[in-house]
Image (cartoon, grey):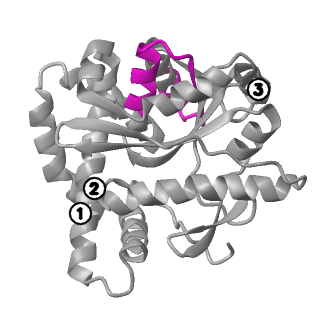
Amino acid sequence: MLLMLLYWTHLIGSALLRFVPHRVAYAVASLIGPVVGYCWPGHYRQARQNMAHILGPTADRREVARRVRNVFRNYGKYVVDVLWLPRARFGELDRKLEIVGLDHIDEAMRRGRGLVLVMGHIGNWDWGGAVLAGKGYPVNALVETLRPARWNDRVQAIRARLGVNVIPVEHGVRETFQALRDNQIVGVLIDRPLTSEGVPVRFFDALTRVPEGAARLALRTGAGVVAVGVVRHGRRLVAHVSPLIDVQPSGDRGRDVQELTQRAMDWLEGVIRRYPDQWFMFRNMWPRTA
Protein backbone atom coordinates (compact mmCIF):
# COMPACT_ATOMS: atom_id res chain seq x y z
CA MET A 1 0.00 0.00 0.00
CA LEU A 2 2.76 2.45 0.96
CA LEU A 3 4.67 1.71 -2.25
CA MET A 4 1.59 2.38 -4.38
CA LEU A 5 1.05 5.61 -2.43
CA LEU A 6 4.54 6.73 -3.49
CA TYR A 7 3.66 6.07 -7.11
CA TRP A 8 0.40 8.02 -6.96
CA THR A 9 2.05 10.86 -5.03
CA HIS A 10 4.63 11.13 -7.81
CA LEU A 11 1.96 11.06 -10.50
CA ILE A 12 -0.43 13.55 -8.87
CA GLY A 13 2.36 15.82 -7.64
CA SER A 14 3.84 16.09 -11.13
CA ALA A 15 0.42 16.98 -12.51
CA LEU A 16 -0.18 19.68 -9.89
CA LEU A 17 3.17 21.33 -10.62
CA ARG A 18 1.90 22.16 -14.08
CA PHE A 19 -0.22 24.85 -12.42
CA VAL A 20 1.93 25.89 -9.44
CA PRO A 21 4.99 28.17 -9.87
CA HIS A 22 8.26 26.70 -8.67
CA ARG A 23 8.77 29.37 -6.01
CA VAL A 24 5.33 28.70 -4.54
CA ALA A 25 5.98 24.94 -4.49
CA TYR A 26 9.31 25.57 -2.72
CA ALA A 27 7.57 27.74 -0.11
CA VAL A 28 4.98 25.03 0.57
CA ALA A 29 7.72 22.36 0.75
CA SER A 30 9.63 24.49 3.26
CA LEU A 31 6.54 24.70 5.46
CA ILE A 32 5.50 21.06 5.39
CA GLY A 33 8.95 19.46 5.17
CA PRO A 34 9.64 19.50 8.93
CA VAL A 35 6.09 18.28 9.62
CA VAL A 36 6.65 15.31 7.32
CA GLY A 37 9.94 14.70 9.14
CA TYR A 38 8.16 14.50 12.52
CA CYS A 39 5.67 12.05 10.98
CA TRP A 40 8.57 9.93 9.74
CA PRO A 41 10.12 9.17 13.15
CA GLY A 42 12.71 6.62 12.06
CA HIS A 43 14.13 8.87 9.36
CA TYR A 44 13.95 11.93 11.61
CA ARG A 45 15.83 10.14 14.38
CA GLN A 46 18.58 9.02 11.97
CA ALA A 47 18.88 12.48 10.45
CA ARG A 48 19.25 13.92 13.96
CA GLN A 49 21.90 11.37 14.96
CA ASN A 50 23.87 11.96 11.77
CA MET A 51 23.66 15.74 12.16
CA ALA A 52 24.84 15.55 15.77
CA HIS A 53 27.83 13.51 14.61
CA ILE A 54 28.69 16.00 11.85
CA LEU A 55 28.43 19.06 14.12
CA GLY A 56 30.43 17.39 16.88
CA PRO A 57 30.01 16.78 20.62
CA THR A 58 30.06 20.51 21.48
CA ALA A 59 27.07 21.28 19.23
CA ASP A 60 24.06 22.77 20.99
CA ARG A 61 20.99 20.51 20.88
CA ARG A 62 18.87 23.37 19.61
CA GLU A 63 21.31 23.94 16.75
CA VAL A 64 21.16 20.24 15.85
CA ALA A 65 17.34 20.38 15.86
CA ARG A 66 17.33 23.54 13.72
CA ARG A 67 19.66 21.96 11.18
CA VAL A 68 17.55 18.81 10.99
CA ARG A 69 14.42 20.87 10.31
CA ASN A 70 16.35 22.51 7.48
CA VAL A 71 17.30 19.07 6.14
CA PHE A 72 13.62 18.24 5.73
CA ARG A 73 12.88 21.68 4.24
CA ASN A 74 15.58 21.11 1.64
CA TYR A 75 14.44 17.54 1.07
CA GLY A 76 10.98 18.92 0.35
CA LYS A 77 12.50 21.22 -2.29
CA TYR A 78 14.35 18.22 -3.76
CA VAL A 79 11.02 16.38 -4.02
CA VAL A 80 9.55 19.42 -5.82
CA ASP A 81 12.44 19.28 -8.30
CA VAL A 82 11.89 15.57 -8.90
CA LEU A 83 8.17 16.08 -9.45
CA TRP A 84 8.91 18.88 -11.92
CA LEU A 85 11.33 16.78 -14.02
CA PRO A 86 8.66 15.11 -16.22
CA ARG A 87 8.06 18.44 -18.00
CA ALA A 88 11.60 19.86 -17.68
CA ARG A 89 13.53 20.96 -20.74
CA PHE A 90 17.30 21.18 -21.00
CA GLY A 91 17.30 24.94 -21.42
CA GLU A 92 15.44 25.42 -18.15
CA LEU A 93 17.68 22.99 -16.28
CA ASP A 94 20.82 24.58 -17.72
CA ARG A 95 19.72 28.05 -16.57
CA LYS A 96 19.03 26.80 -13.06
CA LEU A 97 22.22 24.75 -12.61
CA GLU A 98 25.84 25.90 -12.81
CA ILE A 99 28.69 23.40 -13.09
CA VAL A 100 31.93 24.42 -11.36
CA GLY A 101 34.85 22.26 -12.45
CA LEU A 102 33.52 20.99 -15.79
CA ASP A 103 37.11 21.03 -17.05
CA HIS A 104 37.88 18.11 -14.73
CA ILE A 105 35.24 16.03 -16.51
CA ASP A 106 36.66 17.09 -19.89
CA GLU A 107 40.15 16.07 -18.76
CA ALA A 108 38.92 12.58 -17.90
CA MET A 109 37.02 12.21 -21.17
CA ARG A 110 40.14 13.12 -23.16
CA ARG A 111 41.86 10.06 -21.69
CA GLY A 112 39.40 7.90 -23.60
CA ARG A 113 38.72 5.36 -20.85
CA GLY A 114 35.47 6.66 -19.48
CA LEU A 115 34.63 8.39 -16.23
CA VAL A 116 33.20 7.12 -12.96
CA LEU A 117 31.32 10.04 -11.42
CA VAL A 118 30.78 9.44 -7.70
CA MET A 119 28.11 11.36 -5.81
CA GLY A 120 26.56 11.64 -2.38
CA HIS A 121 22.97 12.06 -1.26
CA ILE A 122 23.33 15.82 -1.19
CA GLY A 123 21.40 18.54 -3.01
CA ASN A 124 19.99 17.25 -6.27
CA TRP A 125 21.94 14.56 -8.11
CA ASP A 126 19.32 13.94 -10.81
CA TRP A 127 19.55 17.48 -12.20
CA GLY A 128 23.34 17.25 -12.51
CA GLY A 129 23.13 14.16 -14.72
CA ALA A 130 20.38 15.69 -16.86
CA VAL A 131 22.38 18.88 -17.48
CA LEU A 132 25.53 16.94 -18.41
CA ALA A 133 23.50 14.82 -20.84
CA GLY A 134 21.94 17.95 -22.32
CA LYS A 135 25.41 19.35 -22.94
CA GLY A 136 26.21 16.30 -25.06
CA TYR A 137 28.06 14.10 -22.57
CA PRO A 138 27.20 10.37 -22.69
CA VAL A 139 25.74 9.86 -19.22
CA ASN A 140 24.73 6.60 -17.57
CA ALA A 141 23.36 6.21 -14.04
CA LEU A 142 23.66 3.08 -11.92
CA VAL A 143 20.34 2.96 -10.06
CA GLU A 144 18.43 0.65 -7.76
CA THR A 145 15.15 -0.66 -9.14
CA LEU A 146 12.19 0.99 -7.45
CA ARG A 147 8.99 -0.66 -6.34
CA PRO A 148 6.26 -0.94 -7.46
CA ALA A 149 7.27 -1.67 -11.04
CA ARG A 150 5.04 1.06 -12.53
CA TRP A 151 6.78 3.68 -10.37
CA ASN A 152 10.18 2.39 -11.46
CA ASP A 153 9.09 2.50 -15.11
CA ARG A 154 7.91 6.10 -14.71
CA VAL A 155 11.03 7.38 -12.94
CA GLN A 156 13.46 5.66 -15.32
CA ALA A 157 11.50 6.86 -18.36
CA ILE A 158 11.84 10.45 -17.10
CA ARG A 159 15.59 10.05 -16.72
CA ALA A 160 15.84 8.51 -20.19
CA ARG A 161 13.87 11.38 -21.73
CA LEU A 162 16.42 13.77 -20.25
CA GLY A 163 19.23 11.85 -21.92
CA VAL A 164 20.44 9.74 -19.00
CA ASN A 165 20.80 6.02 -19.75
CA VAL A 166 19.69 4.00 -16.74
CA ILE A 167 21.59 0.86 -15.74
CA PRO A 168 19.97 -1.30 -13.02
CA VAL A 169 22.57 -1.95 -10.34
CA GLU A 170 21.16 -5.45 -9.74
CA HIS A 171 22.14 -6.81 -13.17
CA GLY A 172 24.00 -4.13 -15.06
CA VAL A 173 27.64 -5.19 -14.68
CA ARG A 174 28.28 -5.95 -18.35
CA GLU A 175 26.53 -2.79 -19.57
CA THR A 176 28.49 -0.68 -17.08
CA PHE A 177 31.86 -2.01 -18.22
CA GLN A 178 30.86 -1.52 -21.85
CA ALA A 179 29.87 2.10 -21.18
CA LEU A 180 33.32 2.83 -19.74
CA ARG A 181 35.06 1.06 -22.63
CA ASP A 182 33.07 3.34 -24.94
CA ASN A 183 34.43 6.39 -23.05
CA GLN A 184 31.13 7.24 -21.39
CA ILE A 185 30.24 8.56 -17.93
CA VAL A 186 28.81 6.29 -15.24
CA GLY A 187 27.28 8.02 -12.20
CA VAL A 188 27.22 6.17 -8.86
CA LEU A 189 25.98 7.18 -5.39
CA ILE A 190 28.57 5.97 -2.87
CA ASP A 191 27.66 7.38 0.55
CA ARG A 192 25.39 4.47 1.47
CA PRO A 193 26.36 2.87 4.80
CA LEU A 194 26.87 -0.90 4.89
CA THR A 195 27.13 -3.05 7.99
CA SER A 196 29.37 -5.86 6.76
CA GLU A 197 30.23 -5.68 3.07
CA GLY A 198 31.87 -2.79 1.26
CA VAL A 199 35.10 -1.01 2.10
CA PRO A 200 35.99 0.66 5.43
CA VAL A 201 36.56 4.42 5.30
CA ARG A 202 36.98 7.20 7.83
CA PHE A 203 34.17 9.71 7.42
CA PHE A 204 33.75 12.67 9.74
CA ASP A 205 36.37 11.17 12.09
CA ALA A 206 34.65 7.81 12.49
CA LEU A 207 34.76 4.49 10.68
CA THR A 208 31.97 3.32 8.40
CA ARG A 209 31.62 1.05 5.37
CA VAL A 210 30.46 2.14 1.94
CA PRO A 211 30.08 0.39 -1.43
CA GLU A 212 33.35 -0.41 -3.20
CA GLY A 213 31.92 -0.93 -6.69
CA ALA A 214 32.81 2.52 -8.05
CA ALA A 215 36.48 2.16 -7.12
CA ARG A 216 36.69 -1.40 -8.48
CA LEU A 217 35.10 -0.27 -11.75
CA ALA A 218 37.64 2.51 -12.18
CA LEU A 219 40.65 0.39 -11.27
CA ARG A 220 39.65 -2.48 -13.57
CA THR A 221 38.93 -0.28 -16.58
CA GLY A 222 41.39 2.58 -16.10
CA ALA A 223 38.50 5.05 -16.03
CA GLY A 224 38.96 8.44 -14.42
CA VAL A 225 37.16 9.30 -11.19
CA VAL A 226 35.68 12.61 -10.04
CA ALA A 227 33.37 13.33 -7.13
CA VAL A 228 30.40 15.67 -7.52
CA GLY A 229 28.15 17.45 -5.04
CA VAL A 230 25.10 19.31 -6.39
CA VAL A 231 23.97 21.88 -3.81
CA ARG A 232 21.24 24.49 -3.63
CA HIS A 233 21.80 28.24 -3.61
CA GLY A 234 18.35 29.80 -3.31
CA ARG A 235 16.36 28.68 -6.37
CA ARG A 236 19.54 27.76 -8.26
CA LEU A 237 21.80 24.72 -8.02
CA VAL A 238 25.58 24.51 -8.25
CA ALA A 239 27.36 21.26 -9.16
CA HIS A 240 30.83 21.21 -7.62
CA VAL A 241 33.18 18.81 -9.45
CA SER A 242 36.38 17.57 -7.81
CA PRO A 243 39.73 17.33 -9.59
CA LEU A 244 40.50 13.88 -10.96
CA ILE A 245 41.08 11.37 -8.18
CA ASP A 246 44.01 9.22 -9.28
CA VAL A 247 45.51 6.30 -7.38
CA GLN A 248 48.77 4.74 -8.49
CA PRO A 249 48.37 0.93 -8.54
CA SER A 250 50.26 -0.64 -5.64
CA GLY A 251 49.84 -4.27 -6.65
CA ASP A 252 47.33 -4.72 -3.82
CA ARG A 253 43.87 -4.29 -5.35
CA GLY A 254 42.10 -4.18 -1.99
CA ARG A 255 44.41 -1.42 -0.76
CA ASP A 256 43.91 0.58 -3.96
CA VAL A 257 40.12 0.24 -3.73
CA GLN A 258 40.20 1.48 -0.14
CA GLU A 259 42.45 4.45 -0.97
CA LEU A 260 40.37 5.54 -3.97
CA THR A 261 37.11 5.25 -2.03
CA GLN A 262 38.59 7.09 0.93
CA ARG A 263 39.76 10.00 -1.23
CA ALA A 264 36.32 10.29 -2.86
CA MET A 265 34.61 10.25 0.54
CA ASP A 266 37.08 12.84 1.86
CA TRP A 267 36.07 15.21 -0.93
CA LEU A 268 32.35 14.61 -0.37
CA GLU A 269 32.88 15.21 3.35
CA GLY A 270 34.19 18.65 2.54
CA VAL A 271 31.02 19.50 0.60
CA ILE A 272 28.77 18.12 3.33
CA ARG A 273 30.64 20.15 5.98
CA ARG A 274 29.79 23.29 4.00
CA TYR A 275 26.15 22.29 3.37
CA PRO A 276 25.10 19.87 6.17
CA ASP A 277 21.46 20.97 5.82
CA GLN A 278 21.40 19.48 2.31
CA TRP A 279 22.69 15.99 3.11
CA PHE A 280 19.73 13.62 2.87
CA MET A 281 21.01 10.66 4.87
CA PHE A 282 18.19 8.92 6.68
CA ARG A 283 20.18 5.78 7.55
CA ASN A 284 22.67 5.13 10.32
CA MET A 285 25.86 6.35 8.63
CA TRP A 286 28.13 4.98 11.33
CA PRO A 287 26.95 1.47 12.29
CA ARG A 288 28.86 0.08 15.23
CA THR A 289 29.87 -2.95 13.16
CA ALA A 290 31.93 -0.76 10.78
Look at the picture and state if 17 lies above or below 47.
Answer: above
Q: Residues within 10 Å of mark 1 (few under 14, many from 20)?
A: many
Label 1 vs 3, first from the N-terminus: 1
Q: Marks 2 and 1: in contact by CB < 8 Å?
A: yes
Give the extent of the magenta segment: 126-153
Label 2 vs 3, first from the N-terminus: 2
Query: Residue extending furthest bottom?
Result: 58
Q: Amino acid at mark 3?
A: Phe
Look at the picture and state if 125 lies above or below 136.
Answer: below
Q: x%, y% of residue 138?
A: 56, 16
What is the number of the mark on residue 69? 1
In the displayed structure image, the side of residue 53 where residue 202 appears, left or right? right
> Residue at horizontal 67%, vertical 45%?
246
Look at the picture and state if 194 lies above or below 54.
Answer: above
Q: Dot 1 lies on which element?
A: helix
> Residue at horizontal 62%, vertical 68%?
208
Quadrant placement of the C terminus: bottom right
Pick whichever, 18 or 262, lies toward us.
Answer: 262
Q: Amino acid at mark 1?
A: Arg
| Residue at mark 2 | 72
Q: Amino acid at mark 2?
A: Phe
> Residue at horizontal 71%, vertical 35%?
170
Q: Residues within 10 Å of mark 2 (few under 14, many from 20)?
A: many
Whole-angstrom CA distance, mark 1 to mark 2, is 5 Å
Q: x%, y% of residue 85?
A: 33, 23
